[in-house]
Image: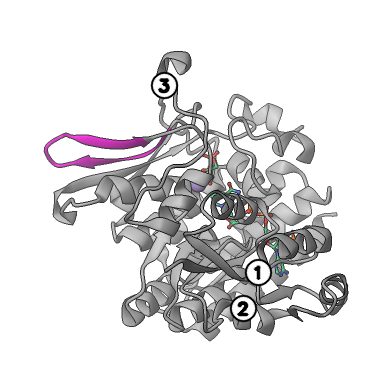
Amino acid sequence: MPEKVVILGSTGSIGRSTLEVVSQHPDEFEVVALAAGSNVEEMIKQAKTFNPKMISMATKEAAEEVRQALNGQVRVLYGEEALIEVATHPDATMVVSALVGSRGLPPTLAAIQADKKIGLANKETLVTAGHIVTQAAEKAGVPILPIDSEHSAIFQCLNGERREDVRRLILTASGGAFRDWSREELVHATPEKALKHPNWSMGAKVTVDSATLMNKGLEVIEAHWLFGFSYDHIDVLIHPQSIVHSMVEFHDGAVMAQLGTPDMKVPIQYALTYPKRLPLLTKPLDLVQISRLDFRKPDLKRYPCLQMAYDAGRVGGTMTAVLNAANEVAVEQFLAGHISFLAIEQVIEQALSKHEPLANPTLEEIEEADRWARDFANRWVSMSA
Ligand SMILES: NC(=O)C1=CN([C@@H]2O[C@H](COP(=O)(O)OP(=O)(O)OC[C@H]3O[C@@H](n4cnc5c(N)ncnc54)[C@H](OP(=O)(O)O)[C@@H]3O)[C@@H](O)[C@H]2O)C=CC1
Ligand SMILES: CC(=O)[C@@H](O)[C@H](O)COP(=O)(O)O
Ligand SMILES: [Mn+2]
């Protein structure tokens, strides 16, 4: 039986890579439904190639364009409710959660509650509402299979191991576009330069997060929820080559690592076919050509976003939703040219310092904290302009 897949965010970087994996194994997968924002042209192309039964776009106009191009033969919906409908399509067995931002939370949660397996790229879902999402998955008995490369690596390293034998998780970080820039040089960091990731080709938001190291901060929180280790047992190392995707250290001193060329098709396929491993057309790892692998500790003073993520994670409750939402606004404003690169960390720091966190929040309380943080961050930006 083929895996019947829904892709939330099919026109994005992860979405397109997922469809490449699907194309390599047409007998293994069937595309049931696709969801995206405003990229009408790409969605029409995908729909003609993969024949989904349902499509969702962000707006009525985008949906109408797609519907017309497909001669009205596919059900094309729009808006937030449509995302839920797509994510819970009765024919689907697996949902790839690859929207960007906390807008991924409601459809991912709905998919879990509708008993779908989840391939999770959208880390903001777990950062925003980790306890609710993991409890829902436990209750429904559905797995959350990590797509994020570091978490896929850790998931593979933990395979067959006993939790109590683990000393710590070690997430690797490339250091992003500004890895070798001083704080003084960062004053002149532009969106154009921030978008040049040294090793990965990804969407704009995660690429900027990589440059601030907020991506690693979000991933520390993601690892906490996925694998259940406390923040004292999750470390980060800068590894400029992005070949070791992450590691697990055990109490006997053994360290397991997962290595590979930086290609998201590998963790995507692993999540889609787990526990099977199918062949995949990707560049083989040539360690002789790479010849060296470097590691160093991140300087938390140079990368305050990573420190803020650890601190917010330790506080817990609504604090991580605020961290995430303030970061989303700050990155958007930076990309729009409204604030400087270094103002990103200031916006987040201010939002965190003003927020009064609630412990063990409900979904509504989390949504309220998310709204409050967006509002706060947008006001901060307009006042600083
Ligand atoms: N790219 C990567 O290699 C990795 C990404 N991730 C995570 O995966 C997630 C996706 O990242 P990435 O693929 O890079 O992001 P992209 O920006 O490339 O893609 C985002 C997707 O979300 C869709 N989208 C945006 N706004 C809306 C909206 N309002 N309604 C519906 N859909 C919307 C976009 O649609 P459209 O383009 O049509 O507007 C697009 O399909 C993020 O959480 C990221 O952190 C994790 C590890 C690696
Ligand atoms: C490919 C992937 O998983 C990204 O999240 C990646 O980790 C970004 O790279 P860095 O955050 O290490 O720069
Ligand atoms: Mn990652």
Q: Which quadrant of the figure has residue 184?
A: top right
Name the residue rendered at 45%, 77% in the picture. Answer: 112
Q: Position of residue 82 (x, y in %)?
A: 68, 82
Q: CA distance from mark 3 to mark 2?
A: 42 Å
Between residue 382 and residue 31, name the one nearer to us: 31
The residue indicated by pointer 1 is: 34
Colour mapping used in the image? one colour
First to last magenta residue range: 244-258
Q: CA distance from mark 3 to mark 1?
A: 39 Å
Residue 293: image tag:
3
Amino acid at dot 2: Val
Amino acid at dot 3: Leu
Residue 86: image tag:
2
Amino acid at dot 1: Leu
Determine contact: label 3, label 2, CB under 8 Å.
no
Determine contact: label 1, label 2, CB under 8 Å.
yes
Name the residue rendered at 52%, 73% in the picture. Answer: 108
Closer to the N terminus: mark 1 or mark 2? 1
